[in-house]
Image: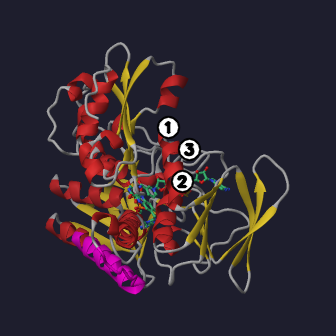
Amino acid sequence: MAEYDVVIIGGGPGGYNAAIRAGQLGLRAACVELRGTLGGTCLNVGCIPSKSLLHASELYELAVKDFAGLGIDVEAKLNLPAMMKQKAESVGQLTKGIEFLFKKNKVDWIKGAGRLAGPGKVEVTAPDGTVLILETKAIVIATGSEPAPLPGVSVDQGRIVDSTGALDLPEVPKHLVVIGAGVIGLELGSVWRRLGAAVTVVEFLDRITPTLDGDTAKTLQRTLTKQGMVFKLGAKVTGATLTNKGVTLNIEPAAGGPAETLEADYVLLAIGRRPFTQDLGLETAGVTVDRRGFIETHHFATNVPGIYAIGDVTQGPMLAHKAEDEAVACIEVISGKAGHVNYAVIPNVIYTFPEVAAVGATEEELKADGVAYKVGKFPFSANSRAKVNHEAEGFVKVLADANTDKILGVHMIGPDVSEMIGEYCVAMEFGASSEDVARTCHPHPTRSEALRQAAMGVEGWTMQV
Ligand code: FAD
Ligand code: NAI
């Protein structure tokens, strides 16, 4: 008789959602987590603390630079320790919330490091060194990811930090150099620039955010540059040396050429993340990984019967909501239901100002696949609400199949687009055409009207100016 129906290794968005869904479905479930709190990367050192600092720093910059333009005279003063404290409080409340949900759904939180220990067995080494064997019918691996290293640049969480260190700097840097113009670099670079740092972003490629639709990436780069962020594209960092003043970086053009140095008091390394499977016993268990270390799955099942994997440790976008959707579907499959994730409708957001939000195919992808498509585009400068709010940067772009009008992709850059992309996710889940959105009444005056106007633009009948 197995002790559990399912044991989940990892308590992040993949692991905790799997555990809660298992509890809801009446399965005897345990979640093994080595960190002192639940919530994984996302709640502890990822989505949540970064959005807390993005929100606070955005308000600070608004108060310093933009309130006067709205007729409000204030003298804003930064209190960095207080900003960090409110961030920590939000994180604490949310991680405690997961503990409450575990209790409510009768999930056991087993504290320690989990390891595969033969068919139906998970060995847990508790923080005090005691070892426990859990017996279970099914195992779900949800051990997440960790920052990718760069040879020659050793992260010490002092002067050279990864995202975790960058969420807790003790002071506003004078000059922060960010290595990697991806999501983390731009979000955390924005936080520190808003709080007063000079920020230089060094990127290997000749464009920022390589997976974004090119149109959006160009607008984002232009806007961030206007805000004061400096980009050094097509450049690679070959080494970082600690000095008594900070850090000296050696930089070379990616295409070859003379090297140069760059001085910084802090460096943020953010060149991507890699799956975390250290000491998990994958090899002994015979679980197959791809050449980059991601666990290979088919409908959440690994090649070993009874072992499943979800979230960042598997292939696909490294996003909390992807991990959450896989968690629910995986547990439903384990309990004999028809769990399913629609990978064509997983939105993607960058929480800079303005924000970027996207779902579905980019123009570049449609061109590469030879798909005939039509474009409807609407600028926020022609949206009345954005205009009166003095936030008229950006656009909404809808890509629809030229033959069927089915929506294939949506790309937005503008204020609060993270809150608006969900409308298009629902539309795409229901297989909507651009005309479906174009003929749906939207409230006036709202920024959401831009969503409709872009859809109207697919057939050329945009009206608002
Ligand atoms: P994780 O959240 O990494 O959780 C894995 C857990 O497993 C960890 O707690 C780890 O301690 C534990 N673990 C590992 N090995 C073991 C073991 N052997 N035994 C026991 N426990 C183990 N995504 C978004 O969608 N939106 C965002 O805004 C966003 N912002 C981010 C900001 C930053 C700075 C970072 C770094 C990431 C951000 N992400 C964001 C990505 C998001 O955090 C991840 O996609 C998400 O956390 C993945 O969930 P997961 O459950 O797969 O893994
Ligand atoms: P990323 O993959 O988004 O960007 C990494 C960037 O670094 C790329 O532009 C890449 O070309 C560049 N790069 C790679 N090697 C380099 C080198 N040697 N020198 C200079 N540049 C180099 O990775 P990032 O920003 O570290 O984020 C990791 C993941 O975390 C993201 O892919 C995302 O899945 C997740 N995340 C999601 C967020 C969100 O949803 N808003 C926020 C933060 C993280």
Q: Secondary structure at mark 3?
A: loop
Residue 319 image point, x, y percent: 40, 52
Instruction: Mark 2 or mark 3: name the one nearer the start of the chain.
Output: 2
Q: Amino acid at mark 1?
A: Asp
Write down the residue under mark 3: 210
Q: Which mark is residue 182?
A: 2
Secondary structure of the residue carrying numbered label 2: loop
Marks 3 and 1, how far apart at CA: 11 Å
Q: Is residue 192 magenta?
A: no
* Region in magenta: 73-97
Q: Residue at 36% across / 62% down in the picture?
A: 12
State the image coordinates of residue 148 (x, y, percent, origin top left): 59, 60
Task: Mark 2 and mark 3 in contact? Answer it, CB < 8 Å.
Answer: yes
Q: Local crowd at mark 1 within 10 Å, few (<14), some, or many (≥20)?
A: some
State the residue position of label 1. 215
Identify the image quadrant of residue 378.
top left
Look at the image and say whether residue 81 sits in the magenta stretch. Answer: yes
Q: Height in image: 378 above or below 175?
A: above
Which corner quadrant of the image does residue 32 belong to? Answer: bottom left
